[in-house]
Image: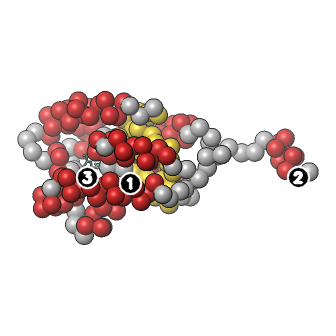
Amino acid sequence: MHTSLNIVLVGFMGTGKTTIGRALADQLKRDYVDMDIELEARASKPIPRIFAEDGEPVFRRMERDLVVELSRRSNLVIAAGGGIVLNPDNIRDLSATGHVICLKATSDEIIHRVSGSNHRPLLEEGDKAGRILKLLMARQPFYDAIPAQVDTTGKTVAEVVAEVLEKIPYSIFQIPSKQENARKEK
Ligand code: S3P
């Protein structure tokens, strides 16, 4: 039974990892870890400042160290940062102790969702829509390589949560059948 494995949400910025991760954790009564928030707490500064003052390679190393730590834990719902897929070791480690599910959305929806955000350093230069399309294109093969995919475009949080749970091989919600209960009572 895989009930103790972590549930790990990956996907491009704006695909809903944080919203869905929180809702999933609530529903399953699991601890929730938002990797970006954890990294900001560890660095004692917001992500744009980590990128500006320390550089992206330092951020990626911190991200990598956190993946190693979280992969040793169980029963978590983890929302990863959008760039987690860039290092194949991250996906290997997260998959060893978790169900990794990739959230996706159309580029129009992503542009709409992140247009008001100013905490994503990779989208700060030039026109945001252009940056998103370019990054999405470059990263698409990494996201596509994750076997479990859930499209969040135009769906409610409850609908996406239900679809994510369907992707988990042995549903955590599985209610024992009458026969199983009868067997246990014997
Ligand atoms: C990044 C995505 C961000 C954050 C950082 C880098 C990326 O997380 O980790 O700005 O490389 O795609 P979200 O996907 O939660 O926005």
Residue at horizontal 65%, vertical 46%?
1
Is residue 122 shown left or right of residue 151?
left
Residue type beneath disc 1: Val
Q: Which mark is residue 153?
A: none
Residue type beneath disc 2: Glu
Give the quadrant of residue 10.
Answer: top left
What is the x, y in percent for residue 160? 47, 39
What is the x, y in percent for residue 166? 56, 36
Is residue 86 shown left or right of residue 55?
right
In the image, farthest residue toward the right: 186
154 over 13 or under it: above or below: above
Q: Is residue 96 visible from the viewing direction of this image?
A: yes
Residue type beneath disc 3: Arg
16 over 151 or under it: above or below: below
Q: Which residue is mark 2?
A: 185
Q: Earlier in the sequence, mark 2 or mark 1?
A: 1
Judging from the image, what secondary structure is the residue with disc 3 in? Answer: helix
Residue in the foreground of this view, choosing between 95 and 115: 95
Q: Which residue is mark 3?
A: 60
Judging from the image, what secondary structure is the residue with disc 2 in? Answer: helix
41 over 157 or under it: above or below: below
Residue at horizontal 91%, vertical 51%?
186
Judging from the image, what secondary structure is the residue with disc 1 in? Answer: helix
Is residue 118 shown left or right of residue 21?
left
Q: Which residue is mark 1?
A: 67
Q: Earlier in the sequence, mark 2 or mark 3?
A: 3
